[in-house]
Image: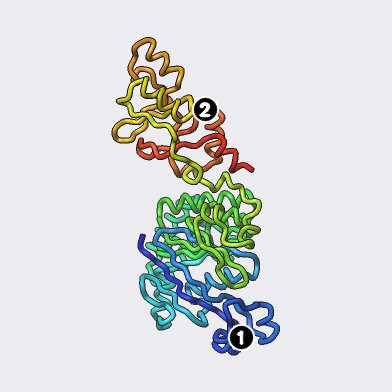
Amino acid sequence: MAVKISVQHVSKIFGSKPLKILQDLTAHFDKSLVMKETQHVVGVHDATFEVNEGEIFVIIGLSGSGKSTLIRCLNLLHRPTGGEILIDGQNICDFSPKKLRELRRHQIAMVFQNFALLSHKSVLENVSYGLTIRGEVKAASQFKARQMLLMVGLDGYENEPISALSGGMKQRVGLARALANDPEILLMDEAFSALDPIVRREMQFELLKLQQQLRKTIVFITHDIQEAFKIGDRVAIMKDSKIVQIGSPEEILTKPADEYVERFITGVDRTQILTVRSIMVVPSCLIQMRSGPNMAIQEMKRNGVSSAFVIDHDLKLSGLVTLQDALKAIAEKLSLAEIINREVIQVEPSTTVSDLVPLAAQSAYPIAVTEEGRLLGIVTKVAILSTLG
């Protein structure tokens, strides 16, 4: 995938002499000590990462970790003290005020935690506001605004005042307003944090549904690890103004970078994050369809198992044969094709463990992992149980 945003060694320091403080910082500085001794606040230090086109990149951290400061650097609401921010290969830190305005009007949109809606305007006027200020005619801007309201489930609310809306509805208006400009990049700063848990889950689902249709490049800020892992393609964890780990939710769960990350992910429902790919194994006993029942029995004995998966010459799964069925085939002079069980439970490698649990309860045998019919591996009940602890 193409890199849409490239952040290279970005730092942001608040105070009267930020450049001098940046020069004096060591890799293992103490943020509170810097504040006490210099009266400068280190918002972000030496952040480096890339966001791919069409990716949801989540930045997570506790209060004061620097995540909101970092996202505000991405559209220069906070101008970095040092480093570069490249969008489509161009360093936006070098942009003129006019070029920066054009970037904000056409390429980047932002959704805030507190909605940031105009209370004296209707829902439709709020959504079309960005289009209006960039010079689009009223009829065209309102047409686009209505399309976005339909997309976020607010069709029919065009003329309602903002005060008449619930928190979740207000956030939908904010999302529709951001999307109306058709930005390439969407920045979302704690966008769902002010919502109650049920509405928050609805909005997370709404965002994922919209992303399937629109494929925007999204940078999402949150302090909720469950939310980060639910919506993020990749996640960056921040601590004391620095990024301590970047990876997919599964990578972070299985290979935390340090003790801090281990503590941070404590309590995460692993079954909702881990996929079949991370726990599947290559089956010890595989039988080719062209093999006979005698060969199947030999393979099962050699591997100490009482069943085996059967594949064709393209490695596509044909079914499963048991020791009992193979013995019956020999006695009745049947071929392997006549006695295999073709009703084998199959899942894709992207299936989550939580979705696998009820399937495992139904099956007396390991579950086959396939992709376009090809057998990639199997998942045993023991492997599933190990993720539940």
Q: Provide residue 143's location: percent of width, then percent of height.
A: 40, 58
Residue at horizontal 51%, vertical 74%?
73
Callout 2 environment at 10 Å: few (<14), some (14 to 19), or many (20+)? few
Residue at horizontal 48%, vertical 51%?
208
Q: Which mark is residue 15?
A: 1
In this picture the colour scheme is rainbow
Q: Is residue 320 above or below residue 166?
A: above
Amino acid found under the numbered disc labelled 2: Ser
Horizontal relation, residue 183 to residue 354: left or right: left
Callout 1 environment at 10 Å: few (<14), some (14 to 19), or many (20+)? some
Tell me which numbered mark, 2 or 1, is placed earlier along the sequence.
Answer: 1
Q: Is residue 22 above or below residue 56?
A: below
**Residue hosting label 2:** 363
**Image quadrant where residue 133 sits:** bottom left
Horizontal relation, residue 239 to residue 377: left or right: right
Q: Of 25 and 286, which appears nearest the observer?
A: 286
Q: Which mark is residue 291?
A: none
In the picture, the quarter occupied by the C terminus is top right
Q: Is residue 362 above or below residue 279?
A: above
Q: Is residue 312 above or below residue 16?
A: above
Q: Provide residue 157's location: percent of width, then percent of height.
A: 52, 53
Amino acid found under the numbered disc labelled 1: Gly
| Secondary structure found at label 2 | loop
Q: Is residue 377 visible?
A: yes
Q: Of 296 and 38, which appears nearest the observer?
A: 296
In the picture, the quarter occupied by the N terminus is bottom left
